[in-house]
Image (cartoon, helix red, strand yellow):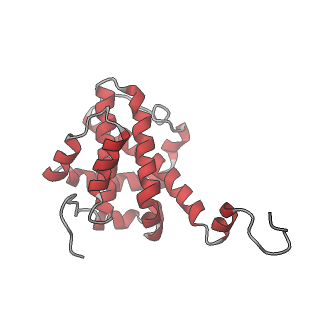
Amino acid sequence: MADSNDGERTDETEVKGAAGGEDVMDDVIIERSAVLLRRYIIERITVEDPSIHVSHEDLGGRPQDAEDPQIKDVVDQLLKIADELNKNAELQHLISTVQANCAQDVFMTVARSIFEDGINWGRVVALFHLSYRLIYLALTQNHFDIIRMIICWFLQFIRENISAWIRQHGGWVSSCFCVCCLATHVEPHRSSQT
């Protein structure tokens, strides 16, 4: 163990935080991703099937998650993009191949296939849409035990594959207006020219 006066690091976490705060920012991105996904699910279900009532608490959140106006603005953008995604036959086919009670490796395989040609906002929204569709199926098929697992898989995928990209593109809230401009191109298995 290093003496506190010799300048050597004693804790890897301390160094990461001191080197620019990426780990702290990624934690904020993950937390906001969870709130965004829960609100996205609630908003989509309210439109698609008003007979299903689900709350933030049902999805592992807190009641105050529903009150953040910035989150509402981002979710509104995500919903607009998702309407376009519903017209993407290839993406819809890919999502329909996954069962509500799927295993984590199946979810991760489909999620990775969405991003195999790179990351863009449209593909990020496609990940939200995939998670929503699976949670919606779980709700309608009484697989309630898997709902929070799907949310955990979504957050794990964000943390391991996308959080740094979101951070580099301004985070969730500051990128709200960019989302609608950049997100309409989603083709999970084709290369895109940029």
The C terminus: image quadrant: bottom left
- Residue placed furthest toward the top: 142
The answer to whether 56 is drawn above or below residue 8 in the figure is: above
- The location of residue 182, given as percent across then percent down, is 29, 67
- The location of residue 23, given as percent across then percent down, is 58, 62
Kindly identify the residue that appears in the image at 67 percent across and 70 percent down.
18
* Relative to 177, 91 lies left or right: left
Nearest to the observer: residue 4 or residue 2:
2
Kindly identify the residue that appears in the image at 27 percent across and 56 percent down.
114
Residue 167 in view in this figure: yes
* Relative to 8, 183 lies left or right: left
Nearest to the observer: residue 61 or residue 144:
144
Number of numbered markers: 0
- The location of residue 153, given as percent across then percent down, is 41, 44
Residue 147 is drawn in which quadrant? top left
Kindly identify the residue that appears in the image at 56 percent across and 62 percent down.
25
The N terminus: image quadrant: bottom right
The answer to whether 11 is drawn above or below residue 94 in the figure is: below
- The location of residue 94, given as percent across then percent down, is 20, 47
The answer to whether 71 is drawn above or below residue 168 in the figure is: above
- Residue placed furthest toward the left: 89
- Residue placed furthest toward the front: 1
Kindly identify the residue that appears in the image at 81 percent across and 67 percent down.
2
Residue 36 in view in this figure: no
* Relative to 194, 42 lies left or right: right
